[in-house]
Amino acid sequence: MVYLLFVLGFIFLIKGADLLVAGASAIGRKFRISEMVIGLTIVSFGTSLPELLVTMISSVNGKPEMGLGNILGSNIANILIILGVAALVRPLPIPRDTYFIEIPFSILAALLMGFLANANIFNSGNSTIGRQEGFIMLYFFILFMVYVFVSTRTRKTEPDKSSLIQKPLLQSIGLIVVGIVGLYFGGGWVVDGATEMARTFGVSQGVIGLTVIAIGTSLPELVTSAVAAYKGNTDMAVGNAIGSNIFNLLWIVGITSVITPIPFTDHSNQDILMVLISSSVLIAAVIIGKRPGISRWEGLFFLLVYATYLFSLINR
């Protein structure tokens, strides 16, 4: 049954992503909101639900290291796998605000979490993300959402004249809800199946959190960004990946640590360093090209970097 649900999970992920992109795009066209803003908010929230579920359940069940590994591993996968695959589908142009504001903000979120965990401001002698640190991270998440709200006034798009028939608002919302439900159950079933297979082969819990579960919970972002890129919604594909990283670090870790402390280890610091390296690779790709964006060759390079990371992780 677990393996059957594993296969059904992929079907739910693909269809859920398709419905989510369709509904979000329709709302963006209706209110003339930029696809980047839609990707940074509605789509990022929906595709981050599996990470939220896995992290909270792992922490409450006394396995916080698996939950933290899931978050850091997902953020690495969001940049190297998701943007890499999406760029292979269609080259991804990066808007000016994204590489000047959103990408640096995601780097700031990673640095903030590392600082709060290692500085021991509120937990003397213990490298822990506790309730106080969680509230600080939620505060920065609120600042990010305020920025997104304000940016909706400047990031307007012209109505899509190619669509003669616009979807009613309730229908668009319904597509988003059904898509999120599909992503939620699909992501959960895929993770359960992948975790069971990993345990069958005797893989450690730490590796499961950083690899199998991280990739599994990132599948909604992967499928959503790939579908968005295929449909030409490249801004939504990029916004989904970057927005999910910010959601994961500030919102999910913030909420989870308010409920239960999350211990931090030396390995966690190494993984945060990898998050920063992957972000640096993204920034380098934006700068090197003739125009800000990720080409197909750069997308392939992203995937090679991730494969190298997996090899080093297994050896660790």
Image (spheres, rainbow, N blue to C red):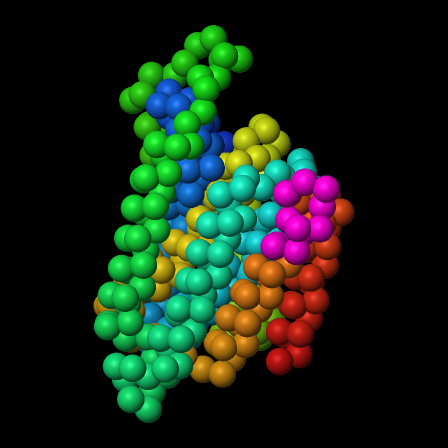
Vertical placement of 55 versus 300: above or below? Answer: below
Is 24 above or below relative to 198? above
Q: Residue furthest right?
A: 297
Q: How many marks?
A: 0
Magenta stretch holds residue 204: no
Q: Position of residue 252 (x, y in %)?
A: 34, 59
Would residue 37 appear left or right of 80 to someone viewing this image? left
Q: Residue at x 61, y 38 (%)?
A: 93
The residue depicted at 32 percent of the width and 40 percent of the height is 149
Q: Residue at x 46, y 19 (%)?
A: 158
Residue 228 relative to residue 109: left or right: right
For this rendering, which residue is in front, 60 or 296? 296
Which quarter of the figure is the C terminus placed in?
bottom right
Question: Do we see residue 243 in this rendering?
Answer: yes
Q: Is residue 283 left or right of residue 205?
A: right
Q: Residue, x 50% and y 45% (percent of image)?
A: 98
Q: Residue 129 location, x and y as percent?
A: 33, 75
Q: State which region is magenta.
A: 282-292
Q: Compared with residue 152, is residue 281 higher up or lower down, i.e. above or below? A: below
Q: 18 or 40: nearer the eye? A: 40
Out of 118 and 9, give the one closest to the viewer.
118
